[in-house]
Image: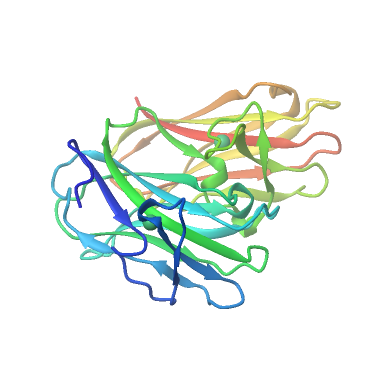
Amino acid sequence: MDDSLFERWLYESESDFEYPNGAYFLDYPYASGEKEIYVAHVLHAEGYMQRGPHTIDFVGTGKYYQATFRLRTSETFTSSNPAALLLVRNIDTGEILANMEVPINTLRNDYRDYKLMFRSPASGRLSYEVYYLDDPALPDLYSDKVTVEEIAEPDPKIYQAETEHRFSDNGTIVEDSYATEGIGHSTGFAVQATAVTDDGKVITFTNSQEVHAAGNYEVIFLARRSSGATDGSYIALLEVWDEVEGFKGYIEVRDSDLGDTGYRVFSVNFNKSSSGRIFYKVYFYGSPTVNFLLDRIELNVV
Ligand SMILES: [Ca+2]
Ligand SMILES: [Ca+2]
């Protein structure tokens, strides 16, 4: 459905999708169309809360788009576990064009916007999907709408650590005044590896399904530490992997390389000889004194 004069579409959660896990419909005065859909831990199982609308609204354009999912919960919950997965999928090829996680502690009782960037496929029908994970730490989840709009090609492409996959849900998602992307909050979010608690853990291992062309790339990790004593020992290992070519490069970071206020840049350059997915892995060696925080990862074509 065309929502405006220029390249913007609106899909209402309550009317433009299918509801495989039996989401309920609610009237809500603050919702677009004054309606939303709802799932609850006590009533619904893990599964697709909404899927569809299987349209070809902007297929074959080669342009970049941003899909914004508008979600809320009933009050503030503290878990860093994912509440849901958001996907943009080409249902005719099965390809996932973009995906992200919605951390429970980023949701509030008023709506927050979760944004996914994707590139138009050559053909196929598109689906904007909310996969509900039924975590007991999140009693309920509400979805209002999905809007899709054309954007300029992102340069660099930015991947916020807090909405990327965390291996075994290690680490925690924290609000951090130095971090970027607040998801509608007053401060940004970051993934934090906590001293001692998270020693020896992989805190991030992304699973982005976005396909990148062959070429030369630079990956930038933006990281900082909490305040505390440092001694120059290694604190983190930042790695880049390719789905076809395997391990592509890494950088080891010492605690003294990190600032305790702003984020610093750590880059890995690599060549990709075939098109495919790129994955980022962050391992926390550990520290007796300081936490390690990852704000975001950026991908540049060089
Ligand atoms: Ca709505
Ligand atoms: Ca961030």
Q: In which quarter of the image is residue 49?
A: bottom left
Nearer-the-camera pick, 114 or 170: 114
Measured from the top left, where is residue 112 in percent x and y?
51, 45
Q: How is the image coloured?
A: rainbow
Q: Please say if 173 is above or below 38.
A: above
Q: Residue at x 54, y 67 (%)?
A: 133
208 sits to left or right of 122: right
Ligand 2 falls in quadrant: top right
On the rendered image, what quadrant is the C terminus found in?
A: top left
Q: Please say if 287 is above or below 227.
A: below
Measured from the top left, where is residue 273 in percent x and y?
30, 41
Measured from the top left, where is residue 11 in percent x and y?
29, 55
Q: Which residue is drawn at 66% across and 37% down?
A: 175
Q: Answer yes or no: is residue 70 visible.
A: yes
Q: Please say if 181 is above or below 256.
A: below
Q: In which quarter of the image is residue 180?
A: top right
